Amino acid sequence: MFHTDTIAAISTGMTSSGIGIIRISGPDAIAIADKVYDSRSGKKLENMPTHTIHYGFIRDGEEFIDEVLVMLMRGPRSFTAEDTVEINCHGGVYAMNRILELVIRKGARPAQPGEFTKRAFLNGRIDLSQAEAVIDVINAKNEYALKSSVSQLKGSVLKVIKDIREKIIYHIAYIESALDDPEHISLDGYPKQLEEQVEQWKEKIRTLIASSENGKRMKEGIRTVIVGKPNAGKSSLLNVLLGEERAIVTDIAGTTRDVLEEQMSLSGISLNIIDTAGIRSTEDVVEKIGVKKAKTYARDADLIIYVVDSSTGLDENDEEIMEMIRDRKAIVLLNKMDLDCITTEEDIRKHLDKPVIPVSAKEEQGIDRLEQTVKDMFYDGSISFNDEIYITNMRQKAALKEALDSLEQVSVSIQNQMPEDFFSIDMMNAYEELGSITGESVGEDLVNEIFSKFCMGK
Ligand code: GDP
Protein backbone atom coordinates (compact mmCIF):
# COMPACT_ATOMS: atom_id res chain seq x y z
CA MET A 1 0.00 0.00 0.00
CA PHE A 2 1.21 3.47 -0.81
CA HIS A 3 -0.65 5.46 1.75
CA THR A 4 -0.34 5.72 5.46
CA ASP A 5 -2.97 8.34 6.04
CA THR A 6 -6.71 7.99 6.01
CA ILE A 7 -8.87 10.19 3.84
CA ALA A 8 -12.54 11.05 3.97
CA ALA A 9 -15.02 12.86 1.79
CA ILE A 10 -18.67 13.16 1.02
CA SER A 11 -19.01 11.01 -2.04
CA THR A 12 -22.54 11.95 -2.97
CA GLY A 13 -23.61 15.37 -4.18
CA MET A 14 -23.97 18.19 -1.69
CA THR A 15 -27.68 18.44 -2.15
CA SER A 16 -30.54 17.53 0.04
CA SER A 17 -30.79 14.12 -1.53
CA GLY A 18 -32.41 11.23 0.28
CA ILE A 19 -29.14 9.57 1.20
CA GLY A 20 -25.63 10.88 1.53
CA ILE A 21 -22.49 8.81 1.70
CA ILE A 22 -19.35 9.69 3.60
CA ARG A 23 -16.49 7.56 2.47
CA ILE A 24 -13.42 6.89 4.59
CA SER A 25 -10.42 5.06 3.18
CA GLY A 26 -7.02 4.18 4.59
CA PRO A 27 -5.35 2.23 7.34
CA ASP A 28 -7.36 3.89 10.13
CA ALA A 29 -10.69 3.96 8.37
CA ILE A 30 -12.28 1.34 10.59
CA ALA A 31 -10.81 2.66 13.83
CA ILE A 32 -11.98 6.19 13.01
CA ALA A 33 -15.45 4.97 12.11
CA ASP A 34 -15.63 3.11 15.40
CA LYS A 35 -15.00 6.37 17.22
CA VAL A 36 -18.14 7.97 15.80
CA TYR A 37 -20.40 5.02 15.15
CA ASP A 38 -22.60 3.48 17.73
CA SER A 39 -24.10 0.17 16.76
CA ARG A 40 -27.34 -0.95 18.29
CA SER A 41 -25.72 -4.16 19.42
CA GLY A 42 -22.72 -2.41 20.92
CA LYS A 43 -20.40 -4.31 18.63
CA LYS A 44 -17.39 -2.61 17.12
CA LEU A 45 -16.84 -2.54 13.37
CA GLU A 46 -13.30 -3.63 14.04
CA ASN A 47 -14.60 -7.06 15.03
CA MET A 48 -16.94 -7.40 12.09
CA PRO A 49 -16.28 -9.40 8.96
CA THR A 50 -15.58 -7.58 5.72
CA HIS A 51 -18.33 -6.70 3.26
CA THR A 52 -21.04 -6.34 5.85
CA ILE A 53 -23.58 -3.62 6.49
CA HIS A 54 -24.44 -2.35 9.95
CA TYR A 55 -27.24 -0.27 11.35
CA GLY A 56 -26.64 2.30 14.06
CA PHE A 57 -26.06 5.93 14.92
CA ILE A 58 -23.45 8.57 14.49
CA ARG A 59 -22.73 10.45 17.66
CA ASP A 60 -20.48 13.31 18.57
CA GLY A 61 -19.89 12.51 22.20
CA GLU A 62 -23.36 12.61 23.71
CA GLU A 63 -24.89 14.34 20.78
CA PHE A 64 -26.88 12.28 18.32
CA ILE A 65 -26.22 13.26 14.73
CA ASP A 66 -27.89 10.78 12.41
CA GLU A 67 -29.24 7.30 11.96
CA VAL A 68 -27.02 5.46 9.52
CA LEU A 69 -26.10 2.32 7.67
CA VAL A 70 -22.40 1.62 7.65
CA MET A 71 -20.67 -0.50 5.04
CA LEU A 72 -17.46 -2.17 5.95
CA MET A 73 -15.00 -3.25 3.27
CA ARG A 74 -11.56 -4.37 4.21
CA GLY A 75 -8.72 -3.94 1.77
CA PRO A 76 -7.76 -5.14 -0.70
CA ARG A 77 -11.36 -5.92 -1.59
CA SER A 78 -12.50 -2.32 -1.88
CA PHE A 79 -12.41 0.37 -4.54
CA THR A 80 -9.20 1.88 -3.20
CA ALA A 81 -7.86 -1.53 -2.13
CA GLU A 82 -7.60 -0.01 1.35
CA ASP A 83 -9.80 -0.52 4.37
CA THR A 84 -12.90 1.45 3.54
CA VAL A 85 -15.96 2.47 5.51
CA GLU A 86 -18.93 4.10 3.89
CA ILE A 87 -21.43 5.83 6.12
CA ASN A 88 -24.85 6.14 4.54
CA CYS A 89 -26.63 8.94 6.31
CA HIS A 90 -29.93 10.61 5.76
CA GLY A 91 -28.48 13.19 3.51
CA GLY A 92 -29.01 16.85 3.72
CA VAL A 93 -25.98 19.02 3.49
CA TYR A 94 -25.95 19.66 7.17
CA ALA A 95 -25.91 16.02 8.35
CA MET A 96 -23.26 15.09 5.80
CA ASN A 97 -21.07 18.00 6.77
CA ARG A 98 -21.40 17.27 10.45
CA ILE A 99 -20.42 13.65 9.98
CA LEU A 100 -17.50 14.48 7.72
CA GLU A 101 -16.30 17.12 10.13
CA LEU A 102 -16.50 14.63 12.96
CA VAL A 103 -14.62 11.97 11.04
CA ILE A 104 -11.91 14.50 10.29
CA ARG A 105 -11.72 15.50 13.90
CA LYS A 106 -11.20 11.85 14.77
CA GLY A 107 -8.16 11.58 12.53
CA ALA A 108 -9.05 11.44 8.86
CA ARG A 109 -7.90 14.08 6.42
CA PRO A 110 -10.18 15.64 3.80
CA ALA A 111 -9.61 13.86 0.49
CA GLN A 112 -8.32 15.84 -2.45
CA PRO A 113 -10.44 15.80 -5.59
CA GLY A 114 -10.08 12.40 -7.22
CA GLU A 115 -7.97 11.02 -4.42
CA PHE A 116 -9.95 7.83 -3.92
CA THR A 117 -9.53 7.10 -7.60
CA LYS A 118 -5.88 7.97 -7.44
CA ARG A 119 -5.44 5.47 -4.64
CA ALA A 120 -7.37 2.83 -6.55
CA PHE A 121 -5.02 3.40 -9.45
CA LEU A 122 -1.83 3.42 -7.39
CA ASN A 123 -2.92 0.30 -5.58
CA GLY A 124 -3.48 -1.44 -8.88
CA ARG A 125 -7.24 -1.65 -8.67
CA ILE A 126 -7.96 0.17 -11.89
CA ASP A 127 -5.90 1.01 -14.92
CA LEU A 128 -4.98 4.44 -16.11
CA SER A 129 -7.72 4.76 -18.69
CA GLN A 130 -10.34 3.87 -16.10
CA ALA A 131 -8.76 6.30 -13.70
CA GLU A 132 -8.78 9.05 -16.29
CA ALA A 133 -12.39 8.47 -17.11
CA VAL A 134 -13.35 8.78 -13.46
CA ILE A 135 -11.10 11.77 -12.95
CA ASP A 136 -12.64 13.57 -15.91
CA VAL A 137 -16.03 13.29 -14.36
CA ILE A 138 -14.68 14.36 -11.01
CA ASN A 139 -12.87 17.31 -12.50
CA ALA A 140 -15.97 18.49 -14.21
CA LYS A 141 -17.85 18.19 -10.95
CA ASN A 142 -15.09 19.77 -8.99
CA GLU A 143 -14.78 22.71 -11.24
CA TYR A 144 -18.37 23.35 -10.43
CA ALA A 145 -17.86 22.60 -6.75
CA LEU A 146 -14.82 24.83 -6.59
CA LYS A 147 -16.66 27.60 -8.32
CA SER A 148 -19.57 27.31 -6.00
CA SER A 149 -17.43 26.97 -2.91
CA VAL A 150 -15.41 29.96 -3.97
CA SER A 151 -18.57 31.87 -4.68
CA GLN A 152 -19.85 30.96 -1.27
CA LEU A 153 -16.81 32.37 0.39
CA LYS A 154 -17.68 35.70 1.77
CA GLY A 155 -16.18 38.61 -0.05
CA SER A 156 -14.39 39.57 3.11
CA VAL A 157 -12.73 36.16 3.39
CA LEU A 158 -11.62 36.20 -0.20
CA LYS A 159 -10.18 39.64 0.27
CA VAL A 160 -8.15 38.62 3.32
CA ILE A 161 -6.78 35.57 1.54
CA LYS A 162 -6.02 37.42 -1.66
CA ASP A 163 -4.24 40.17 0.24
CA ILE A 164 -2.04 37.68 2.02
CA ARG A 165 -1.26 35.89 -1.23
CA GLU A 166 -0.35 39.10 -2.93
CA LYS A 167 2.05 40.00 -0.17
CA ILE A 168 3.55 36.53 -0.07
CA ILE A 169 4.21 36.55 -3.79
CA TYR A 170 5.73 39.99 -3.53
CA HIS A 171 8.17 38.75 -0.93
CA ILE A 172 8.99 35.59 -2.84
CA ALA A 173 9.68 37.70 -5.88
CA TYR A 174 11.76 40.10 -3.84
CA ILE A 175 13.93 37.32 -2.45
CA GLU A 176 14.37 35.68 -5.84
CA SER A 177 15.31 38.95 -7.40
CA ALA A 178 17.74 39.83 -4.65
CA LEU A 179 19.42 36.50 -4.97
CA ASP A 180 19.66 37.01 -8.71
CA ASP A 181 20.88 40.53 -8.50
CA PRO A 182 22.61 41.07 -5.15
CA GLU A 183 24.34 44.19 -6.39
CA HIS A 184 21.16 46.16 -6.70
CA ILE A 185 18.81 44.52 -4.26
CA SER A 186 19.98 44.08 -0.71
CA LEU A 187 18.74 41.57 1.79
CA ASP A 188 20.37 43.31 4.75
CA GLY A 189 17.94 43.44 7.61
CA TYR A 190 15.33 41.89 5.37
CA PRO A 191 14.60 38.76 7.45
CA LYS A 192 13.53 40.91 10.37
CA GLN A 193 11.15 42.82 8.17
CA LEU A 194 9.79 39.62 6.68
CA GLU A 195 9.32 38.12 10.10
CA GLU A 196 6.95 40.92 11.07
CA GLN A 197 4.97 40.39 7.91
CA VAL A 198 4.79 36.64 8.43
CA GLU A 199 3.47 37.19 11.94
CA GLN A 200 0.67 39.33 10.55
CA TRP A 201 -0.26 36.77 7.92
CA LYS A 202 -0.29 34.01 10.48
CA GLU A 203 -2.52 36.04 12.73
CA LYS A 204 -5.01 36.62 9.93
CA ILE A 205 -5.07 32.96 8.95
CA ARG A 206 -5.54 31.97 12.58
CA THR A 207 -8.52 34.26 12.75
CA LEU A 208 -10.02 32.63 9.68
CA ILE A 209 -9.47 29.17 11.12
CA ALA A 210 -10.85 30.20 14.50
CA SER A 211 -13.96 31.65 12.95
CA SER A 212 -14.66 28.27 11.43
CA GLU A 213 -14.27 26.55 14.75
CA ASN A 214 -15.86 28.87 17.22
CA GLY A 215 -18.90 26.72 17.51
CA LYS A 216 -20.92 28.90 15.23
CA ARG A 217 -22.02 26.09 13.05
CA MET A 218 -22.91 27.62 9.82
CA LYS A 219 -25.14 25.73 7.54
CA GLU A 220 -24.69 26.64 3.97
CA GLY A 221 -27.47 28.86 2.88
CA ILE A 222 -29.09 32.23 3.11
CA ARG A 223 -30.00 33.08 6.65
CA THR A 224 -33.63 33.89 6.48
CA VAL A 225 -35.89 35.14 9.20
CA ILE A 226 -39.66 35.21 9.03
CA VAL A 227 -41.08 38.11 11.00
CA GLY A 228 -44.55 39.43 11.58
CA LYS A 229 -47.07 39.86 14.30
CA PRO A 230 -48.51 36.86 16.05
CA ASN A 231 -51.26 35.27 14.01
CA ALA A 232 -50.06 36.74 10.74
CA GLY A 233 -49.43 33.20 9.52
CA LYS A 234 -45.69 32.71 10.02
CA SER A 235 -45.91 29.10 11.18
CA SER A 236 -48.37 28.26 8.45
CA LEU A 237 -46.04 29.75 5.88
CA LEU A 238 -43.09 27.90 7.28
CA ASN A 239 -44.97 24.65 7.06
CA VAL A 240 -45.90 25.28 3.46
CA LEU A 241 -42.32 26.17 2.60
CA LEU A 242 -40.79 23.26 4.37
CA GLY A 243 -43.29 20.77 3.05
CA GLU A 244 -41.74 17.38 3.42
CA GLU A 245 -38.29 18.74 4.02
CA ARG A 246 -39.06 19.20 7.60
CA ALA A 247 -36.80 16.34 8.63
CA ILE A 248 -33.71 18.34 9.46
CA VAL A 249 -34.36 20.17 12.65
CA THR A 250 -31.43 21.11 14.77
CA ASP A 251 -30.52 23.38 17.57
CA ILE A 252 -27.99 25.98 16.70
CA ALA A 253 -25.19 26.03 19.17
CA GLY A 254 -24.76 29.17 21.13
CA THR A 255 -28.24 30.56 20.79
CA THR A 256 -31.31 30.14 22.83
CA ARG A 257 -32.55 26.63 22.90
CA ASP A 258 -36.00 27.48 21.67
CA VAL A 259 -34.84 28.76 18.34
CA LEU A 260 -34.60 26.30 15.53
CA GLU A 261 -32.87 26.66 12.28
CA GLU A 262 -34.29 24.66 9.47
CA GLN A 263 -32.73 24.22 6.13
CA MET A 264 -34.71 24.10 2.98
CA SER A 265 -34.15 24.42 -0.70
CA LEU A 266 -36.18 26.89 -2.67
CA SER A 267 -35.70 26.39 -6.40
CA GLY A 268 -32.26 25.01 -5.68
CA ILE A 269 -31.21 27.85 -3.39
CA SER A 270 -30.52 26.86 0.17
CA LEU A 271 -32.26 28.87 2.82
CA ASN A 272 -31.69 28.46 6.52
CA ILE A 273 -34.85 29.58 8.08
CA ILE A 274 -34.55 30.79 11.61
CA ASP A 275 -37.76 29.59 13.05
CA THR A 276 -39.05 32.15 15.47
CA ALA A 277 -42.58 31.02 14.85
CA GLY A 278 -42.56 28.86 17.91
CA ILE A 279 -42.20 31.89 20.10
CA ARG A 280 -45.60 32.58 21.42
CA SER A 281 -47.02 34.19 24.46
CA THR A 282 -50.42 34.03 25.98
CA GLU A 283 -50.08 37.35 27.71
CA ASP A 284 -51.20 40.73 26.53
CA VAL A 285 -47.72 41.90 25.81
CA VAL A 286 -47.62 39.32 23.08
CA GLU A 287 -47.26 41.81 20.27
CA LYS A 288 -44.31 43.47 21.87
CA ILE A 289 -42.57 40.21 22.48
CA GLY A 290 -43.04 39.13 18.90
CA VAL A 291 -41.54 42.34 17.62
CA LYS A 292 -38.68 42.31 20.06
CA LYS A 293 -37.69 38.74 19.30
CA ALA A 294 -38.00 39.32 15.61
CA LYS A 295 -35.66 42.26 15.89
CA THR A 296 -33.02 40.21 17.57
CA TYR A 297 -33.07 37.50 14.96
CA ALA A 298 -33.49 39.81 12.02
CA ARG A 299 -30.28 41.58 12.87
CA ASP A 300 -28.11 38.74 11.53
CA ALA A 301 -30.33 37.71 8.67
CA ASP A 302 -29.46 37.86 4.99
CA LEU A 303 -33.10 37.93 4.04
CA ILE A 304 -36.20 38.90 5.99
CA ILE A 305 -39.62 37.65 5.07
CA TYR A 306 -42.22 39.89 6.61
CA VAL A 307 -45.64 38.31 6.88
CA VAL A 308 -48.62 40.65 7.14
CA ASP A 309 -52.16 39.52 7.84
CA SER A 310 -53.96 41.27 4.99
CA SER A 311 -57.34 40.65 6.60
CA THR A 312 -56.54 43.14 9.34
CA GLY A 313 -55.19 46.66 9.34
CA LEU A 314 -51.64 47.75 9.95
CA ASP A 315 -50.85 48.97 13.43
CA GLU A 316 -47.90 50.48 15.22
CA ASN A 317 -46.24 47.07 15.53
CA ASP A 318 -46.25 46.72 11.79
CA GLU A 319 -44.85 50.20 11.50
CA GLU A 320 -42.08 49.26 13.86
CA ILE A 321 -41.28 46.15 11.83
CA MET A 322 -41.33 48.11 8.60
CA GLU A 323 -39.00 50.65 10.08
CA MET A 324 -36.67 47.86 11.12
CA ILE A 325 -36.53 46.26 7.67
CA ARG A 326 -36.41 49.48 5.67
CA ASP A 327 -32.72 49.16 4.86
CA ARG A 328 -32.61 45.39 4.74
CA LYS A 329 -33.18 42.78 2.08
CA ALA A 330 -36.77 41.88 2.63
CA ILE A 331 -39.85 40.51 0.98
CA VAL A 332 -43.32 41.39 2.22
CA LEU A 333 -45.97 38.69 2.09
CA LEU A 334 -49.56 39.82 2.27
CA ASN A 335 -50.93 36.66 3.74
CA LYS A 336 -54.51 35.43 3.92
CA MET A 337 -55.36 36.67 0.45
CA ASP A 338 -58.19 34.15 0.53
CA LEU A 339 -59.97 36.41 3.04
CA ASP A 340 -61.35 39.92 2.58
CA CYS A 341 -58.53 42.30 2.04
CA ILE A 342 -58.06 45.18 4.48
CA THR A 343 -54.37 45.86 3.99
CA THR A 344 -53.40 46.24 0.34
CA GLU A 345 -50.15 46.27 -1.59
CA GLU A 346 -50.47 50.05 -1.85
CA ASP A 347 -50.71 50.36 1.93
CA ILE A 348 -47.38 48.59 2.23
CA ARG A 349 -45.76 50.44 -0.64
CA LYS A 350 -46.54 53.73 1.08
CA HIS A 351 -44.07 52.67 3.75
CA LEU A 352 -41.65 50.35 2.03
CA ASP A 353 -39.94 49.93 -1.27
CA LYS A 354 -39.81 46.12 -1.24
CA PRO A 355 -41.33 43.32 -3.26
CA VAL A 356 -44.87 42.73 -2.00
CA ILE A 357 -46.49 39.40 -2.78
CA PRO A 358 -50.06 38.42 -1.95
CA VAL A 359 -50.13 34.84 -0.69
CA SER A 360 -52.31 32.43 1.16
CA ALA A 361 -50.44 30.06 3.39
CA LYS A 362 -53.67 28.25 4.01
CA GLU A 363 -54.44 27.62 0.37
CA GLU A 364 -50.83 27.54 -0.71
CA GLN A 365 -51.27 30.35 -3.19
CA GLY A 366 -48.61 32.81 -4.26
CA ILE A 367 -45.79 30.61 -3.02
CA ASP A 368 -44.41 30.24 -6.54
CA ARG A 369 -44.09 34.02 -6.76
CA LEU A 370 -42.21 34.04 -3.50
CA GLU A 371 -39.85 31.39 -4.89
CA GLN A 372 -39.33 33.36 -8.06
CA THR A 373 -38.62 36.53 -6.11
CA VAL A 374 -36.05 34.82 -3.89
CA LYS A 375 -34.46 33.33 -6.98
CA ASP A 376 -34.30 36.69 -8.74
CA MET A 377 -32.81 38.38 -5.71
CA PHE A 378 -30.22 35.65 -5.37
CA TYR A 379 -29.15 35.61 -8.98
CA ASP A 380 -29.00 39.34 -9.36
CA GLY A 381 -26.80 39.37 -6.29
CA SER A 382 -29.03 41.47 -4.09
CA ILE A 383 -29.12 38.72 -1.48
CA SER A 384 -26.16 36.56 -0.69
CA PHE A 385 -24.75 34.72 2.22
CA ASN A 386 -23.99 36.43 5.45
CA ASP A 387 -21.03 38.68 5.28
CA GLU A 388 -19.26 37.44 8.34
CA ILE A 389 -15.91 35.83 7.98
CA TYR A 390 -16.31 32.14 8.01
CA ILE A 391 -14.87 29.22 6.24
CA THR A 392 -17.21 26.29 6.10
CA ASN A 393 -15.78 24.05 3.51
CA MET A 394 -13.55 21.47 5.10
CA ARG A 395 -11.08 21.40 2.30
CA GLN A 396 -10.69 25.13 2.62
CA LYS A 397 -10.15 24.80 6.32
CA ALA A 398 -7.48 22.15 5.79
CA ALA A 399 -5.76 24.38 3.23
CA LEU A 400 -5.68 27.23 5.74
CA LYS A 401 -4.06 24.98 8.29
CA GLU A 402 -1.45 23.85 5.77
CA ALA A 403 -0.74 27.47 4.87
CA LEU A 404 -0.35 28.33 8.53
CA ASP A 405 2.06 25.42 9.04
CA SER A 406 4.16 26.57 6.12
CA LEU A 407 4.31 30.09 7.49
CA GLU A 408 5.28 28.76 10.92
CA GLN A 409 8.11 27.07 9.11
CA VAL A 410 9.15 30.40 7.59
CA SER A 411 9.30 31.90 11.08
CA VAL A 412 11.44 29.02 12.27
CA SER A 413 13.79 29.44 9.32
CA ILE A 414 14.10 33.16 9.99
CA GLN A 415 14.78 32.62 13.66
CA ASN A 416 17.43 30.05 12.81
CA GLN A 417 18.99 32.46 10.35
CA MET A 418 18.64 30.11 7.47
CA PRO A 419 19.49 31.36 3.97
CA GLU A 420 16.72 33.38 2.33
CA ASP A 421 15.87 30.84 -0.32
CA PHE A 422 14.63 28.60 2.47
CA PHE A 423 11.92 31.12 3.18
CA SER A 424 10.68 31.09 -0.38
CA ILE A 425 10.00 27.39 -0.43
CA ASP A 426 7.64 27.53 2.52
CA MET A 427 6.12 30.80 1.44
CA MET A 428 5.42 29.19 -1.90
CA ASN A 429 3.63 26.34 -0.16
CA ALA A 430 1.50 28.79 1.78
CA TYR A 431 0.80 30.68 -1.42
CA GLU A 432 -0.34 27.53 -3.17
CA GLU A 433 -2.51 26.36 -0.31
CA LEU A 434 -4.22 29.72 -0.12
CA GLY A 435 -4.63 29.65 -3.87
CA SER A 436 -6.48 26.38 -3.65
CA ILE A 437 -9.07 28.23 -1.57
CA THR A 438 -9.54 31.15 -3.88
CA GLY A 439 -9.34 28.97 -6.97
CA GLU A 440 -6.23 30.68 -8.29
CA SER A 441 -3.30 28.53 -9.14
CA VAL A 442 0.36 29.16 -9.20
CA GLY A 443 1.81 29.69 -12.58
CA GLU A 444 1.91 32.63 -14.80
CA ASP A 445 1.02 35.14 -12.18
CA LEU A 446 4.18 34.25 -10.28
CA VAL A 447 6.46 34.41 -13.25
CA ASN A 448 4.92 37.64 -14.45
CA GLU A 449 5.12 39.13 -11.01
CA ILE A 450 8.80 38.40 -10.63
CA PHE A 451 9.73 39.78 -13.98
CA SER A 452 7.46 42.74 -14.00
CA LYS A 453 8.34 43.92 -10.53
CA PHE A 454 12.07 43.56 -10.44
CA CYS A 455 13.57 42.54 -13.66
CA MET A 456 12.17 45.09 -15.99
CA GLY A 457 14.53 46.42 -18.58
CA LYS A 458 17.25 43.92 -17.97
P1 GDP B 1 -48.22 32.93 13.43
O1 GDP B 1 -48.61 33.28 14.80
O2 GDP B 1 -47.77 34.12 12.67
O3 GDP B 1 -47.24 31.82 13.36
O4 GDP B 1 -49.53 32.47 12.67
P2 GDP B 1 -50.11 31.01 12.37
O5 GDP B 1 -49.39 30.40 11.23
O6 GDP B 1 -50.18 30.23 13.61
O7 GDP B 1 -51.53 31.39 11.87
C1 GDP B 1 -52.49 32.08 12.67
C2 GDP B 1 -53.89 31.72 12.23
O8 GDP B 1 -54.10 32.20 10.91
C3 GDP B 1 -54.13 30.24 12.18
O9 GDP B 1 -55.41 29.99 12.63
C4 GDP B 1 -54.00 29.89 10.71
O10 GDP B 1 -54.79 28.79 10.33
C5 GDP B 1 -54.51 31.16 10.06
N1 GDP B 1 -53.93 31.37 8.75
C6 GDP B 1 -52.62 31.35 8.42
N2 GDP B 1 -52.46 31.61 7.10
C7 GDP B 1 -53.69 31.78 6.59
C8 GDP B 1 -54.19 32.08 5.28
O11 GDP B 1 -53.47 32.23 4.30
N3 GDP B 1 -55.53 32.20 5.15
C9 GDP B 1 -56.37 32.06 6.21
N4 GDP B 1 -57.67 32.20 5.99
N5 GDP B 1 -55.96 31.78 7.44
C10 GDP B 1 -54.63 31.63 7.64
Image (cartoon, grey):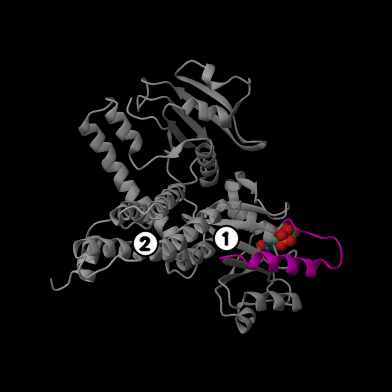
Spot occupied by residue 248 in the image (x, y as percentages of width and height): 60, 45
Camera sees residue 396: yes
Q: Quadrant of ligand 1?
A: bottom right
Instruction: Tell me: residue 267, above or below residue 384.
Output: above
**Which span is picked out in magenta?**
278-302
Distance Cα–Cα, label 1 vs label 2: 45 Å
Secondary-structure class at tag 1 = strand
Q: Is residue 291 magenta?
A: yes
Q: Residue furthest left?
A: 458
Magenta-drawn stretch contains 406: no
Position of 60 with respect to 383 (left or right) is right
Q: Which mark is residue 102?
A: none
Where in the figure is residue 451, as x and y percent of width and height? 19, 66
Report the quarter where the N terminus lies.
Answer: top left
Identify which residue is drawn at 43% across, 69% down: 380
Measured as percent of width and height from the top left, residue 36 is found at 57, 32
Whether residue 309 sits left or right of residue 302 in the image: it is: right
The mark nearer the N terminus, 1 or 2, is 2
Please provide percent x and percent y for residue 193. 39, 66
In depth, the one of 326 and 389 nearer the eye is 389
Q: Amino acid at mark 1?
A: Arg
According to the image, label 1 marks what residue?
223
- 347 to 310, vertically: above or below: below
Q: Secondary structure at mark 2?
A: helix
Residue labelled with disc 2:
191
Q: Is residue 6 above or below residue 386?
A: above
The residue depicted at 64 percent of the width and 67 percent of the height is 298
Q: Of the residues shown, which amino acid type is indicated by label 2? A: Pro
